[in-house]
Image (spheres, rainbow, N blue to C red):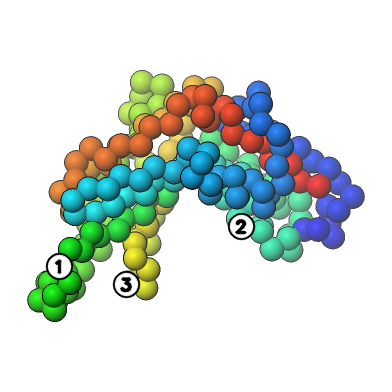
Amino acid sequence: MKKVISSISLLITFLWCSCSSMTALAPDAYVRYMDDPANDLIRTIKLKTATYTIHLITPEYIASKEFSDGSDSIKNFEKRLRDLEGVIYFYINIQKNNTDNSVAAGMAEKSKAEQMVMYYEADAAKDIYLLNNNNQLSPAIYHYEDNYGLAAYNKIIVGFHVDTKNPDYKLVFNDRYNDNPQIQASYSSSTIKNLPQLTIK
């Protein structure tokens, strides 16, 4: 991308709000901002059986990550942003709180692995919704990533078509597999409206 746009300056207004008070950031700086827990976009809910980390994600974040190697054109970057427009995303990382490290407990956990995958791949989408501007929204996009024990957590990626003029969001997840109802993460309109803009030079 650097070869194509090194002499071009483009300001892509943040899709959720055109009046952001934040300074515009380049893609790599934008990703760092979104990943910084200090910026109030990541919620951690620790319960008895599992810990949930919920991360609000914007189209700009996704496009910036996908084009992070700088090898593609600005035209393709803009097209990807248009494809993602109007959807807000959440990463939900689920980490089991294993208090029993015995061999028997490990074998019992492995025996339930198929049941877990079946639930998160097929049924969990029905147990997640988003409250936005007094509307309850079902997921438009849902994907489950099983890390097969290679990482400490498994991940759900979920996206919703939202009212971008009223960006107040509350994600609700009733995790029936871990018997954890009403897991919630709220994001105020002011938090969303103060997200940075994205600039490409």
Please tell me which of labels 3 and 2 falls first in the chain: 2
Q: In terms of secondary structure, where does tag 2 sit? A: helix
Q: Is residue 161 left or right of residue 130?
A: right
Residue 76 versus residue 108 in the image, above or below: above
Who's the residue at 71% across and 37% down the image?
A: 24
Residue at the far left in the pictured view: 104
Residue 166 in picture, x, y percent from top left: 49, 22
Residue 86 in picture, x, y percent from top left: 54, 35
Answer yes or no: is residue 57 visible. Answer: no
Residue 149 numbered mark, or none: 3
Mark 3 neighbour density, 10 Å: few (under 14) some (14–19) many (20 or more) = few
Who's the residue at 30% across and 58% down the image?
A: 95
Who's the residue at 59% across and 45% down the image?
A: 33
Residue 77 in picture, x, y percent from top left: 69, 50
Mark 1 neighbour density, 10 Å: few (under 14) some (14–19) many (20 or more) = few
Residue at the far bottom in the pictured view: 103
Residue at the far right in the pictured view: 7
Q: Marks 1/2: CA distance?
A: 39 Å
Please tell me which of labels 1 and 3 falls first in the chain: 1
Given this view, does label 3 or label 2 mark the residue nearer the observer?
3
Q: Marks 3/2: CA distance?
A: 25 Å
Residue 125 numbered mark, or none: none
Residue that mark 2 sits on: 66
Residue 100 numbered mark, or none: 1
Q: Is residue 130 left or right of residue 200?
A: left
Answer yes or no: is residue 55 visible. Answer: yes
Q: Is residue 55 left or right of residue 102?
A: right
Amino acid beneath label 3? Gly
Amino acid beneath label 2? Glu
Amino acid beneath label 1? Asp
Q: Is residue 118 left or right of residue 72?
A: left
Residue 147 in picture, x, y percent from top left: 36, 68
